[in-house]
């Protein structure tokens, strides 16, 4: 009671100052306003409003707060009543379906856990070390090592590769017409997303199925290796595949390295150049340029792994600029 009376007296006292303030404002407006007087008036108004806010803090509170609180409380009470009624009605049904609900929820939880594991980095798989991510889940940057020596790493000569060609290949054909009749034992490899077949002048794009799988696996592994090393994707370029006897005879007239009993006659052998690669890009998404030596180093690592797994024999051709590969 005394607080309200004191508040009323303070309000009456402030009303006198308010009248005085209004008189000064009217007089201030009648005067010629300068920069200093404008600043003084602004300061006076700010101080007055601060004083009102200090004495009557309720003026700064939103007027709809109490109404909203009351309305919300009414809505909550009504919802509680509805939920209580519905809970009584559905209690029997809940008891009947509780057993099946628990079983289904456990199955859903197991499925969600599997999804989380499948979406998580492979560092979480059975505690095994990952080659893609470190223990913190960050992507690992892989270095390019190449091979110590190309000739020593890929030394498989003609006498070694011809044995595998005779074992896994088809019978040599004389010309392209005879090759048409042997296509039932061969697979077309002229179009593939993992490698590019160059314009073939002395061979045709056919291989035995085992060699076709090897070529595709090499191209796909090369994509993976480029991706993990942060290098823009490039396709390997296949320069020679299946040859007929006429192709070999024609080639020997200008290529001294071509042998009469070539492994290319059997559909088990293909050549991949190491000084040219086909860049994968579009006009809207151009890729950065990569030196051929860098691509060659990465490709040599891939071929070394395939040779170490006994998937193929490889000869490093210096003069022809290619890897001569025969399936094992």
Image (spheres, helix red, strand yellow):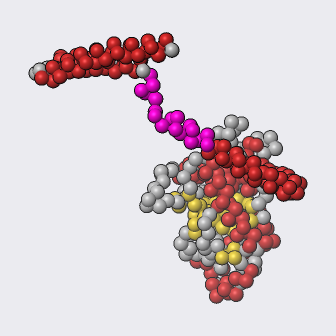
- Judging depth in this view, the residue of 170 and 84 nearest the camera is 84
Q: Is residue 129 magenta?
A: no
- On the question of residue 198 being in view, the answer is yes
Residue under the image location 86 percent in, 55 percent down: 92
* Secondary structure that dominates the magenta span: helix
| Res. 284 image quadrant | bottom left
- Judging depth in this view, the residue of 272 and 110 nearest the camera is 110
Q: Is residue 66 magenta?
A: yes
Looking at the picture, how far across and down is residue 162, in whole percent? Answer: 75, 68
Looking at the picture, how far across and down is residue 41, in whole percent? Answer: 22, 19
Residue at the farthest left position: 32
Q: Which residues are magenta?
A: 57-74
How many numbered circles does the render carry?
A: 0
Residue under the image location 28 percent in, 14 percent down: 17
- Judging depth in this view, the residue of 26 and 328 nearest the camera is 26
Q: Is residue 155 left or right of residue 48?
A: right
**Which image quarter is the C terminus in?**
bottom right
| Res. 57 image quadrant | top left
224 in relation to 271, above or below? above
Q: Is residue 104 left or right of residue 300?
A: right
204 in relation to 236, above or below? below
Residue under the image location 48 percent in, 54 percent down: 287
287 in relation to 239, above or below? above
- On the question of residue 145 being in view, the answer is no
Looking at the picture, how far across and down is residue 254, in whole percent? Answer: 55, 71
Residue under the image location 52 percent in, 60 percent down: 280
């Amino acid at each position: 009671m005394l607080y309200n009376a004191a508040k009323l007296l303070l309000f009456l006292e402030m009303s006198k100052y308010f009248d005085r303030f209004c008189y000064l404002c009217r007089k201030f407006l009648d005067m010629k306003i300068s920069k200093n007087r404008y600043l003084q008036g602004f300061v006076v108004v700010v101080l007055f409003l601060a004083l009102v806010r200090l004495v009557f803090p309720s003026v700064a509170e939103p007027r709809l707060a109490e109404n909203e609180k009351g309305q919300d409380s009414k809505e909550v009470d009504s919802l509680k009543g509805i939920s209580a009624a519905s809970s009584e009605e559905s209690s029997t049904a809940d008891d009947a379906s509780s057993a099946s609900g628990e079983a289904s929820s456990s199955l859903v939880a197991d499925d969600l856990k599997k999804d989380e594991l499948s979406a998580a980095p492979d560092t979480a798989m059975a505690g095994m070390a990952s080659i893609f991510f470190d223990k913190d889940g960050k992507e690992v940057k892989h270095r390019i090592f190449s091979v110590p020596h190309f000739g020593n790493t890929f030394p498989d000569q003609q006498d070694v590769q011809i044995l595998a060609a005779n074992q896994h290949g088809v019978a040599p054909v004389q010309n392209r017409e005879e090759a048409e009749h042997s296509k039932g034992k061969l697979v077309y490899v002229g179009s593939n997303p993992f490698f590019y077949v160059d314009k073939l002048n002395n061979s045709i794009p056919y291989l035995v199925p085992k060699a076709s799988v090897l070529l595709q696996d090499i191209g796909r592994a090369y994509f993976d290796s480029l991706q993990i090393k942060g290098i823009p994707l490039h396709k390997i370029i296949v320069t020679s595949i299946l040859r007929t006897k006429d192709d070999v005879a024609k080639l020997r007239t200008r290529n001294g390295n071509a042998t009469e009993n070539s492994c290319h006659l059997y559909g088990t052998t293909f050549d991949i150049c190491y000084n040219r690669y086909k860049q994968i890009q579009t006009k809207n998404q151009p890729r950065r340029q990569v030196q051929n030596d860098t691509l060659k180093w990465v490709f040599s690592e891939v071929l070394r792994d395939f040779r170490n797994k006994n998937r193929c024999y490889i000869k490093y051709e210096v003069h022809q600029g290619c890897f001569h590969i025969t399936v094992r």
